[in-house]
């Protein structure tokens, strides 16, 4: 199950058309044939964490060795302000400079969440292999993190859709071409306005089940707009306010020989 989940995340592509395996997997006859298998898999005790809410103990992943990990990001309010300003500027620029034809050979921003915030995962080493558009890192430092406050759980596509309905941020011009290729949908696109979301929630957690049922597809928000969950790993949390701190527990160093190999913990020498 872990290997299948890792492959699903690793092969997510928001800037190109679905490949042949994606097309076949989406056929009703295939999904119907696999329904009974899915029901048995969902009963396995090892995957109960697929739909669990955010854990109190989390891990921030620094994709470097333990010799030089960076501190956790600070000042999330300023980060979100900068994010909003850059997104609005890109949307205005894209509307003037990019063709309105979604089939045009153009690519740009495709992710749905802001970068530069504290971003944590619930399972180590499982989460080390669950990264969209990975750069093939071979070293990682897991930093233990504790956070408090109000957490919004995205456990179903409807949770994400509701967030977009309440705090819509239009990104049609900047996402049009990539998301058309990925989903086949031509129309207006929105993502959550994370600056506004931060006024109500300290953190937002995407469960594994929320990812598997919602990511990489067009989710209808209303009659005119849709959204995509993109660039966000399963069972991970983005922290929108300054409530997450590195805990006193030891950091963990992890290594793998090459992309696709199993991660192993690097124990300190005695």
Image: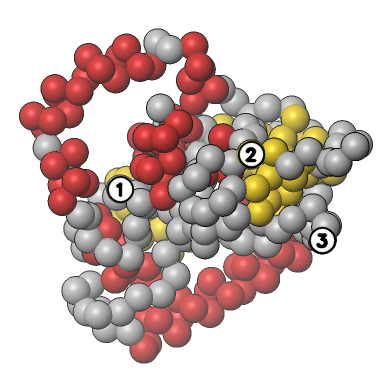
| Residue that lies at the very extreme toward the front in this rendered image | 270
| Real-space Cα separation, disc 2 to disc 1, in angstroms | 33 Å
Residue at 64% across, 35% down = 124
Question: In the image shown, does 33 or 238 lie closer to the viewer?
Answer: 33
Instruction: Please report whichever mark, 2 or 1, sits nearer to the chain's N-terminal start.
Output: 1
Residue corresponding to mark 1:
217
Residue 74 found in image quarter: bottom right
Q: Quadrant of the C terminus?
A: top right
Callout 2 touching callout 1 (CB < 8 Å): no
Q: Which is in the foreground here, disc 2 or disc 1? A: 2
Residue corresponding to mark 2:
264
Question: In the image shown, does 69 or 164 lie closer to the viewer?
Answer: 69
| Residue that lies at the very extreme toward the bottom in this rendered image | 97
Residue at 65% across, 48% down = 255
Q: Secondary structure at mark 2?
A: strand
| Real-space Cα separation, disc 3 to disc 2, in angstroms | 19 Å
Q: Quadrant of the N terminus?
A: top left
Q: Residues within 10 Å of mark 1 (few under 14, many from 20)?
A: some
Residue corresponding to mark 3:
68
The count of marks equals 3
Q: Is residue 111 left or right of residue 95?
A: right
| Real-space Cα separation, disc 1 to disc 3, in angstroms | 37 Å
Q: Is residue 166 visible?
A: no
**Image location (x, y in percent) of residue 87:** 53, 71
Asked if 44 appears above or below 74 in the picture, the reply is: above
Instruction: Please report whichever mark, 3 or 2, sits nearer to the chain's N-terminal start.
Output: 3
Question: In the image shown, does 230 or 149 lie closer to the viewer?
Answer: 230
Q: Which is in the foreground here, disc 3 or disc 2? A: 2
| Residue that lies at the very extreme toward the left in this rendered image | 29
Q: Which is in the foreground here, disc 1 or disc 3? A: 3
């Amino acid at each position: 199950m872990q290997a299948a989940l890792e492959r699903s995340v690793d092969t997510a592509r928001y800037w190109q058309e679905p490949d042949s395996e994606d097309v076949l997997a989406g056929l009703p006859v295939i999904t119907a044939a696999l329904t009974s298998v899915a029901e048995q898999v969902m009963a396995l005790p090892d995957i109960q964490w697929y739909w669990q809410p955010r854990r109190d103990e989390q891990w921030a992943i620094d994709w470097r060795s333990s010799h030089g990990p960076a501190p956790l990001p600070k000042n999330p309010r300023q980060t979100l302000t900068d994010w909003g300003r850059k997104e609005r500027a890109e949307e205005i620029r894209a509307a003037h400079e990019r063709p309105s034809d979604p089939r045009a050979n153009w690519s740009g921003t495709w992710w749905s969440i802001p970068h530069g915030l504290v971003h944590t995962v619930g399972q180590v080493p499982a989460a080390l292999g669950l990264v969209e558009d990975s750069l093939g890192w071979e070293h990682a430092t897991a930093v233990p993190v504790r956070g408090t406050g109000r957490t919004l759980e995205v456990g179903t596509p409807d949770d994400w859709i509701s967030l977009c309905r309440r705090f819509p941020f239009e990104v049609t011009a900047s996402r049009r071409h990539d998301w058309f290729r990925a989903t086949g949908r031509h129309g207006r696109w929105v993502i959550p306005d994370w600056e506004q979301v931060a006024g109500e929630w300290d953190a937002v957690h995407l469960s594994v089940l929320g990812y598997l049922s919602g990511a990489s597809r067009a989710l209808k928000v209303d009659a005119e707009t849709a959204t995509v969950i993109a660039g966000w790993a399963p069972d991970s949390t983005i922290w929108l306010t300054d409530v997450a701190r590195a805990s006193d527990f030891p950091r963990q160093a992890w290594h793998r020989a090459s992309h696709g190999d199993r991660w192993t913990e690097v124990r300190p020498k005695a």
